[in-house]
Amino acid sequence: MFPRIGLEVHVELNTKSKMFCPCPVGEWEEPNVAVCPICLAHPGSLPVPNRTAVIFAVSLGLALKGEISRVSHFYRKNYFYPDLPKGYQITQYSVPIVRNAWILGKRIERINLEEETAKSLHLEDGTVLLDFNRAGIPLLEIVFAPEISLPEEAKEVLRALQSAVRYLGISNADMEKGQFRVDVNVSISASRETFGTKVEIKNLNSFRAIADAIEYEIKRQSEIIMGGGKVVQETRMWNGKETEPMRTKETESDYRYFPEPDIPPLLVDESTIEEAKVLIKEMPWEKEERYISLGVPKNLAKIIAYDLELSQTFDSLRGVNPKRWAEYLVNVIVGRLNQKGKTLRDFDVWGFGKLLEKVEKGEILEEYLKVAVQKNIFEGVPFERLIEEAPKPVEIDLESLVDELVKNNPQQVEKYKKGQKGVVGFFVGQIMKDLRGKVDPKVVSDVVVKKLEES
């Protein structure tokens, strides 16, 4: 059995006004205050496309090496839900603004510009209230080709997309706030060349939920087919443990697409292209490769590169050992900040950088770094003072100490000569114990290896 996974992502754009009217975009405590005749679909009101939203869509298309349509079209997609003011959604259909884009080797078939729906508020007594503040916010609908085959692949490519729109500054892409929403299509077929019956999964509010739902649905459909049954085309909902039926899946004909008569063809001219290019920076997958080339381990390079705040923090500190800086940033600093309920914005990166420079020059022992970070984050001790109070390495004739240790442990030396390189740790441990941490263990290790090779 061969699974095919398609992804449909809706991304709310960080524009100041809505997609087709001048109503402001934001978070409002009161319902139905950011509305006007256009987004409420009053008779005679005319929509006008938001130019910033167009620029944002083009910037993502360019960043993902997609084909930009110089002329695209808006359509009416008809369906009658209470949260849709017009009874139809203005979206793109025959010609989207971007086609055939790529991310992590996966193809995006199309990127459409469209508008957001209203927000439904479900009360305990069964009453449903509607807040139209959200109706009309600009959306990007990003449709992946059904060429993904593994749940983890889907999760990885979605993380990359979320990171990309954040890097471009076109969306905060917060899944908890509904700014980055994902629907998944899963089908199972007997061969790689054919398609099975597609099932859509909704209510996916985390990357972990996406991967789990895909895994469950692949298993469910496989069992149906292996048992001689037929998979029903439908929309299902993820409840945290399994998918369950939601409704029969609409087909394209159900939406009765037709051209939006009030909006002329959308033209993307050279000035729009140039404004979009200004937004494009080094993308996360490019940063990952750069970090690896600097000597940062691959796992750390990926963690830092795909987190905008982490990457900005990492790049802000230059002139220090990239590998050591990455290790402390991810494995020590972030963890301590989380424990204290703080973020990287609360951390004195420059002060830590000065401390790190002292360590690299051999003026302060590396073991002190964790102690200093702990005191800075939990006790508020500034790094300037921590540097002044740092224990300094002492002048010790290491070579003489190691010579004496090697001389008194011939059996350990013999083990080393037979290829047991772990013996180095024995000698380093003895020296560090005798000197009570007053020297850098890496320096000790280098001297030990040198003396063992000479013996």
Image (tube, rainbow, N blue to C red):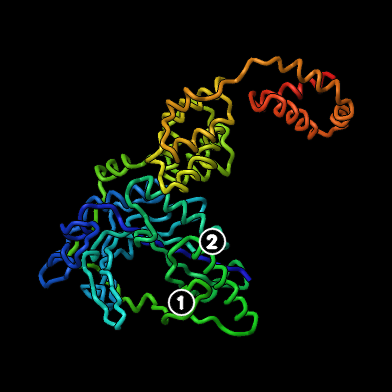
Residue at (77% x, 20% y) in the render:
402
- The disc placed on residue 236 is 1
Number of numbered discs overlaid on the protein picture: 2
Res 40 visible: yes
Q: Quadrant of residue 133?
A: bottom left
Front-most of 410 and 199? 410
Res 360 visible: no
Specify whether 198 is left or right of 44.
right
Q: Nearer the viewer, mark 2 or mark 1?
A: 1
Disc 1 crowd, CA 10 A, few/some/many (<14, 14-19, 20+) = many
- For the residues labelled 2 and 1, the Cα–Cα distance comes to 19 Å
Front-most of 290 and 243? 243
Q: Are marks 2 and 1 in contact (CB under 8 Å)?
A: no
Q: Is residue 17 above or below residue 76?
A: above
Which quarter of the figure is the C terminus placed in?
A: top right
- The disc placed on residue 148 is 2
Residue at (52% x, 69% y) in the render:
213
- The disc placed on residue 249 is none
Q: Quadrant of residue 1?
A: bottom right
The kind of residue on which mark 1 rests is Arg
Q: Position of residue 433 (x, y in %)?
A: 71, 29
Front-most of 392 and 91? 392
Residue at (40% x, 45% y) in the render:
343
Q: Position of residue 326 (x, y in %)?
A: 53, 37
Disc 2 crowd, CA 10 A, few/some/many (<14, 14-19, 20+) = some
- Label whose residue precedes the other's in the sequence (2 or 1): 2
Front-most of 146 and 199? 199
The local secondary structure at tag 1 comes to strand
Specify whether 143 is left or right of 359.
left
The kind of residue on which mark 2 rests is Ile
